[in-house]
Image (cartoon, rainbow, N blue to C red):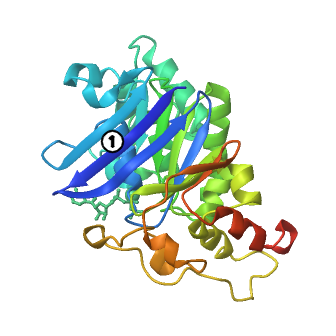
Amino acid sequence: MLLQIKNLKVGYRNIEVVRGVELNIDKGECVGLIGESGCGKTTVGLSVTKLIPERIGMTSGEILFEDKNILKLNPEELRNIRGKKISYVFQEPFSSLNPVFTVYEQIREMLEKKNNIYIQIAEILKSVGLEKIIGRKNVYPHELSGGMQQRAMIGMAIASKPSLVILDEPTTALDVTIQRQILDLITGLKNKMNLSILFISHDLRIVFSIADKIGIMYAGKIVEYGTKEKIISSPSHPYTIGLIDSIPSFEHRKQLFNVIGGKAPLFSELPKGCKFYPRCRFRIKECLKKEPELKDISADHFSRCILTSEIAARRLPKQNRSI
Ligand SMILES: Nc1ncnc2c1ncn2[C@@H]1O[C@H](COP(=O)(O)OP(=O)(O)OP(=O)(O)O)[C@@H](O)[C@H]1O
Ligand SMILES: [Mg+2]
């Protein structure tokens, strides 16, 4: 296992927003992390490279990368991992590219070996579909379109030949056609470089198109985890079911689709028992007693709901659903 996140907890100003996350990523595997805005996805991603400063966030648990606990590494050890073995594509790509340096300079900065620099940069530009700017050493980020900037960001992320890349909403700011191209690019690089990927998104359709395994997060915890196939064919947590049911299907676009009512609770006012209870259409009184554990329901499939088997029995067969 390349990365193991164990009982990760992160609190900002004494309010816990990541409340015990467990997640594993194997070599060459893409794990999607999905959930509504504010559920803690970016906080998990940032914790993997210990990017949350101690004065801002209290972090506990273990993040084992190549069998070392990242949360216990000193600054020098971290420097050998960040941007080298693990790279990060941030949620706001345009603010992550530095406007005062050329694209060449920014990729050069990330190279592990400083020999044959221009050959290396040309190879990277080619692998991210930026052949157009090979040899054009004076191109600045603002001269590129949004899609090309995102390609440049991905180029920087793979320049050091990392084993893990964290992509935080890498396509949210792009229009649908460009989004598709970037997702294809990421999948291609993953296969070619045997990359492991943590792919953060709030869009289930995007995660379905790219991830091998999916963790669904709600109010700071994973509520369902499984292979993409299991999540598509037998979603088991009511929150996942709500997310899937709210995807308008292509054929039934004009029909009304079910959306999850209500809002996620504030971290400072979490309800007792199951945190999804107030919005759950399957809820029973029992759910208020205590927050359910993440339990395995079949091989490679886990759910944090006491009603999993009852819900499965009430679900429509797959062919009658939108996906
Ligand atoms: N630096 C910070 N200080 C205080 N609270 C923070 C800080 N960063 C995030 N939070 C809070 O922590 C919670 C989780 O935030 P996080 O950014 O991890 O969520 P997210 O799932 O990535 O959301 P989004 O989909 O909007 O990017 C939110 O309630 C947010 O307001
Ligand atoms: Mg985020």
Give whichever of 309, 72 is nearer the camera: 309
**Percent of width and height locating residue 94:** 37, 54
Quadrant of the image where one finds ligand 2: bottom left
**Percent of width and height locating residue 322:** 77, 73
Q: Is residue 233 left or right of residue 235?
A: right
> Quick check: can you spot residue 312?
yes
Q: Quadrant of the N terminus?
A: top right
**Percent of width and height locating residue 184:** 67, 46
> Quick check: can you spot residue 322?
no
Q: At label 1, which amino acid type do we have?
A: Ser
The answer to whether 171 is drawn above or below residue 83 in the figure is: below
**Percent of width and height locating residue 140:** 37, 44
Residue depicted at 60% across the width and 32% down the height = 127
The answer to whether 257 is drawn above or below residue 200 in the figure is: below
Question: To which quarter of the image does residue 288 belong?
Answer: bottom left
The answer to whether 29 is drawn above or below residue 273 in the figure is: above
Residue depicted at 28% across the width and 49% down the height = 10
Q: Is residue 252 left or right of residue 134?
A: right
The residue indicated by pointer 1 is: 47
